[in-house]
Image (cartoon, coloured by chain):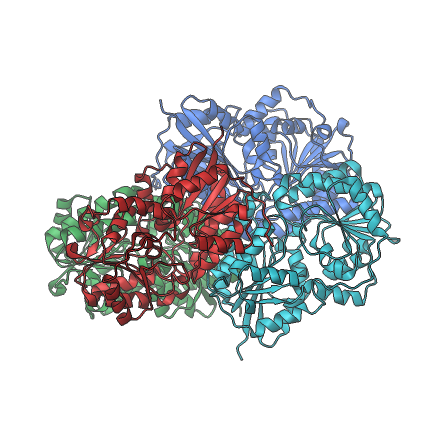
Chain colours: A cyan, B red, C green, D blue
Amino acid sequence: MTQRKICVVVTARPSYSRIKTALKAIDEHPALDLQLVIAGPALLTRYGNAVDYIEKDGFRIAEKVFMVLEGENPTSMAKTTGLGVMELAGVFHKLQPDAVITIADRFETIATSIAASYQNIPLVHIQGGEVTGNIDEKVRHANTKLADIHLVASEDAKERVLKLGEQPDTVFNTGCPSIDIAKEVLDQPTLDFDPIEKYGGVGADIDWGKGYLVVMQHPVTTEYESARKDVETTLHAINELDIPTFWFWPNVDAGSDGTSGGIRSFREIYKPQNIRFFKNMEPEDFLRLLINAKCLIGNSSVGIRECSYLKVPVVNIGTRQHNRQRGLNVKDVSYHKELIKEAIKDRISFKQLEDEYIYGNGTAGSEIAKILATIPLNYHKTISY
Amino acid sequence: MTQRKICVVVTARPSYSRIKTALKAIDEHPALDLQLVIAGPALLTRYGNAVDYIEKDGFRIAEKVFMVLEGENPTSMAKTTGLGVMELAGVFHKLQPDAVITIADRFETIATSIAASYQNIPLVHIQGGEVTGNIDEKVRHANTKLADIHLVASEDAKERVLKLGEQPDTVFNTGCPSIDIAKEVLDQPTLDFDPIEKYGGVGADIDWGKGYLVVMQHPVTTEYESARKDVETTLHAINELDIPTFWFWPNVDAGSDGTSGGIRSFREIYKPQNIRFFKNMEPEDFLRLLINAKCLIGNSSVGIRECSYLKVPVVNIGTRQHNRQRGLNVKDVSYHKELIKEAIKDRISFKQLEDEYIYGNGTAGSEIAKILATIPLNYHKTISY
Amino acid sequence: MTQRKICVVVTARPSYSRIKTALKAIDEHPALDLQLVIAGPALLTRYGNAVDYIEKDGFRIAEKVFMVLEGENPTSMAKTTGLGVMELAGVFHKLQPDAVITIADRFETIATSIAASYQNIPLVHIQGGEVTGNIDEKVRHANTKLADIHLVASEDAKERVLKLGEQPDTVFNTGCPSIDIAKEVLDQPTLDFDPIEKYGGVGADIDWGKGYLVVMQHPVTTEYESARKDVETTLHAINELDIPTFWFWPNVDAGSDGTSGGIRSFREIYKPQNIRFFKNMEPEDFLRLLINAKCLIGNSSVGIRECSYLKVPVVNIGTRQHNRQRGLNVKDVSYHKELIKEAIKDRISFKQLEDEYIYGNGTAGSEIAKILATIPLNYHKTISY
Amino acid sequence: MTQRKICVVVTARPSYSRIKTALKAIDEHPALDLQLVIAGPALLTRYGNAVDYIEKDGFRIAEKVFMVLEGENPTSMAKTTGLGVMELAGVFHKLQPDAVITIADRFETIATSIAASYQNIPLVHIQGGEVTGNIDEKVRHANTKLADIHLVASEDAKERVLKLGEQPDTVFNTGCPSIDIAKEVLDQPTLDFDPIEKYGGVGADIDWGKGYLVVMQHPVTTEYESARKDVETTLHAINELDIPTFWFWPNVDAGSDGTSGGIRSFREIYKPQNIRFFKNMEPEDFLRLLINAKCLIGNSSVGIRECSYLKVPVVNIGTRQHNRQRGLNVKDVSYHKELIKEAIKDRISFKQLEDEYIYGNGTAGSEIAKILATIPLNYHKTISY
């Protein structure tokens, strides 16, 4: 039997967590042949070297695509995307996949969508149908309109993709593969490693044994000049609370200079005594860190998604996760130092009892592989209304 | 008062006809400053040199963007688009427009959309919300999801854009600017020039004085290998009818080689005695040619749009205009020689009496300028559901 | 034993003739592994589809690289080169050759040189050290300065490369592989096919049996606006002589529009009765056509190189072959109709008796393979003075 | 009188120092119009933001060109160059300069050379004819072969350019503009600022008042994997000497990750108590820092060039400045910790008395402007032998 060649393009560390169990399930499925392409920031040291984790997980990489144009401003973001289209067009032409998978809504994901759909390769979009409040919003729904098959992560998202005029027989709620990993980790929730010993990091030598916070704050693309001010607000709030804190650097985006620069100069000036900074961790370690944390603070989608399943208290700051369906664990707050401090105190004493399965129950990866093995693959579609 | 800088990107001859009266209205509006960018095939001799007509019409061109990668296969189509994103990103960065206009659904129009939206420039999409049946379909709706303001050409289209989740206060039915030109031409409908004398063309020295056909057939992107077969079917049908015919070469698209190659070899082998081939004409001349034609044959959207307003009989072949709202003047037919011949005979004797204004009543250009002068310009949007 | 991977980049029809026997010798050499990359105009229908001939000759193509940006003006020529660097950098990164070969001096050959040398891959330059009079001159010597090994075609050229500061143990006069083909063809010189029957062509149905001319005229890059005028001069001269003529279209270059346009409009207006136009022929057929011709007219290097070995009379027009070492067979003339006609008449009655081996004696291909198999491969060099 | 438009492309901080007084002289010359283009690393924060200094110096910037592709490996270096050709081709097409200036031998300078020469714009190469030992060597001489006019910095260099076959009336020894700045600074040699107060930097709060070292070490492109090992050797040597040291980060190059990474991890592990790290300084401040230093250590060309004129003792490590003509002030040493320490001790006690003018006597800027105002501008050249 000829296997279907499924080409997946991973461009960033967080996208990898969102697709990892699906990659494994595709790789192991007898009817499927995985072609894994690593592109953009996922290849770069200063964005956490996702490629190293991917190779360590045992995946064979079919192609590496360098496409990030330096500048970290909106113009270079656009040019990076254009370059991505050019490079990925060549890659798909060579690999001749039966279907291409593009993931979620990072700005460069539309490069995958164009390079595939313009070459008449059936395009699968993972995690469409969600709502946020910036350029990701535009990219996500444009990906949906370029895609032929839609594997979404919640009922909410499924309904939205259908309203966008997609044919019902091409839209499936598989749940999110990130929950698959969360499920595995929840079976062995103990923090079985010393984060500082294992990952190093820079900054204070914090004493995290009696409880700690985790912070993960990304710049918001369309407000890119205020990125520095925003991160400073959070830094001051955390510093004043004086609880041991693991802080993660942002991934690439226009404005990451603002966020990173803000962190760097804060460190030089205030020399915070209870914060340690990390680039990234292996997904499982990171989840175990979260499970045992007093609270996650910032604007990462991990707080909305995995933490809902894991029942980790979250203080979600600002507009980045605006409109995304969230669980009982999340408290929303704006960029105001005192409000952030209060919200953290509130969450530290919060205890969630009920289970919630908004983004799936831990079987997304195998669901995705099963659908890809059998669904008719077309690249010709018409709007449903 | 500071004028709003409105940057319009024109990439092809037919797009120019679809926007010309709006360009004029923007140029003349006291609150608006037109920045006209000519890009891609519109600059190339073998696609009809649209740029010459544009300059002759008196427009000042702010930038010319060469971006067409040779090859005329799906891979080079994708790469052309990627290159377009890179080039246009630089152009917008330099021109710093207050809004950018992208037109309709040609494959390279998404380059304009990405280059603008990724740089947080409000994006206006003209002629969204329509339906066809190939890559254009994907591109058009992706443009809608990247755009902030929607100026559509029919009620049908307006309703569809709203269903796609766009905010009602950003969607306007202005009609199509191509109808504005049709209206002007209809005031002086006489064919006041000799097409052969004025435009040359190649092929037979046809005697068109007692009636003639016009043919305009484009390759259909996703069926690109059958382009040659399709055009041969039409060529045989027309040749057998033996009525004087003006035939227009296709514009660039993956597969134009197929169509163009089909025409070239047909000419060498069959030496058709009643067909003359043209690259293109000035829009007004072309419309006058249509008004006085017995019938338009092919798959051009002109048959659906202008010819409805002008009441010119049309034989529409194949799937290219599939699902597009059409008037009484159109007869649809598949690629079958005898069916095409019959349909043409049917249309030649057809006479339409009732007026139809499906795509506007001739004021689209000034409507568009008026909206652009006053509408709030944002680049931040969220889906309406 | 591990074979040395030798990557050769062929970008145009004439370059292929200049390397073909070397490709074969590399392919057959037990210590060498040929990686053949076809790039740029060699892939395009309207420049003669060299790729078809290459595949028909039995070569396996490792990569096809589309890189020609449409426009055919100096700006698109430069952009094509930049695009070529980007694409070829990725190709070499993937193929990991032990050495890369760049051929002669076409504008896009420097893309090969940069993509290889910047990645620390030993670069071999074929046919450096010659002299011409335009952008090729700059490109050729820049290629020499980027290259590590130099395989030149004449003593003249060898001396020049040494003067350019290259180390003597890296410079070899192998002769030109095009002479290898000429040698084989000369063993069976009879014109054993009907050119019109086999290749078609367009134009007059000439009666070539009692003798004919061959014309091959390329635009000269730096004089690109006069390309049209130049070709018209030659066209008028040939037309007035009224001898059956095989005329070959130019290959891609800035200005080919001028030359091609000049030919097209001349055909429409003057309908020449004794000229037939061809895109290209298989190299062996073309040489046989030359051997039996009364005279070759134009500015092709074939007149300087192969025709010297074959003793075919040549009228060389204009500056394109300026300063290139030439044989007794060549008569130089400027773009002046009457002078061209006179020179042709002079050459038709010319008879060369002595042998000349300026560009080798027919063993270049195997010489090249032998050197590549054994020479030390370095990418670190310093000027010799 | 029409001014000659002279377009200068500056791509890096050190190139700016090498051209600054010439920029000023061109800007002020009545017959010349300066078009200043800033491209590549010169625009990026992490390579020292040269653009800020340039703007502060009062120059108007005609275009900013983002072209650095992330990756910092040889492949991205090549792709950056290809992208540079594409972008600069568009810039020159728009600015329509009468001549373009490319500076020295950084890898991306060939992008300027190709974009200009392929568009038939006369190309001026500054600081050709020198000798080093890596990819710069190839780039520099290729620039010479693409250029029409050569303004070199020493007699040695002039002789070499002539040997490369350039016409004598196009080669001029103007001296190096960097010496012009050195001359001005030497008139007021006192260190009139506190480097830490003015520039911050990171690392130890060194007590530099009683004497200090300066270190500037760049990765060597073709040995890019050993960059980290090399910088560690120097770091250990300096750390063990325990003399207050100002250390400057490297500029972009393949391997700068190695050098930068080496510095970063050394800092974390060894916490050096007498080294402070800086990104860069204004050229005048930097020179004043050098004049008052005990010794400059590393592989920067500043040690060869400015320091010769300024009589600052230099320990030059490794092959990067190999073969460049040097003065009495320089001691060469290989990457060996103890040898480096000894050489530094030797230099600290060294005192140079004789003047040396190897790279000019301080009038290069005005010389360059004078030549550009009057020399015939051609783009057509032929090798001299």
Residue that extends furthest to the top in the rendered view of this protein: D187
Tell me if residue C232 comes above or below residue A100 in the rendering: above
Which one is in front, D35 or D280?
D35
Which one is in front, A335 or C383?
A335
| Label tally | 0
Q: Residue at x 15, y 54 (%)?
A: B209
Residue that extends furthest to the front in the rendered view of this protein: B354
Visible in this render: residue C195? no
**Which image quarter holds the C terminus of chain B?**
bottom right
Q: Position of residue B282 (x, y in %)?
A: 28, 46
Q: Position of residue B236 (x, y in %)?
A: 24, 68
* C335 relative to D283 in the view: left or right: left
Tell me if residue B319 comes above or below residue B291 in the rendering: below
* B377 relative to A313 in the view: left or right: left
* Res D270 quadrant in image: top right
Tell me if residue A59 comes above or below residue D363 in the rendering: below
* A174 relative to B152 in the view: left or right: right
Q: Position of residue D321 (x, y in %)?
A: 58, 40
* Res A308 quadrant in image: bottom right
Visible in this render: residue D131? yes
Residue that extends furthest to the bottom in the rendered view of this protein: A1
Q: Position of residue A376 (x, y in %)?
A: 52, 72
* A363 relative to A111 in the view: left or right: right
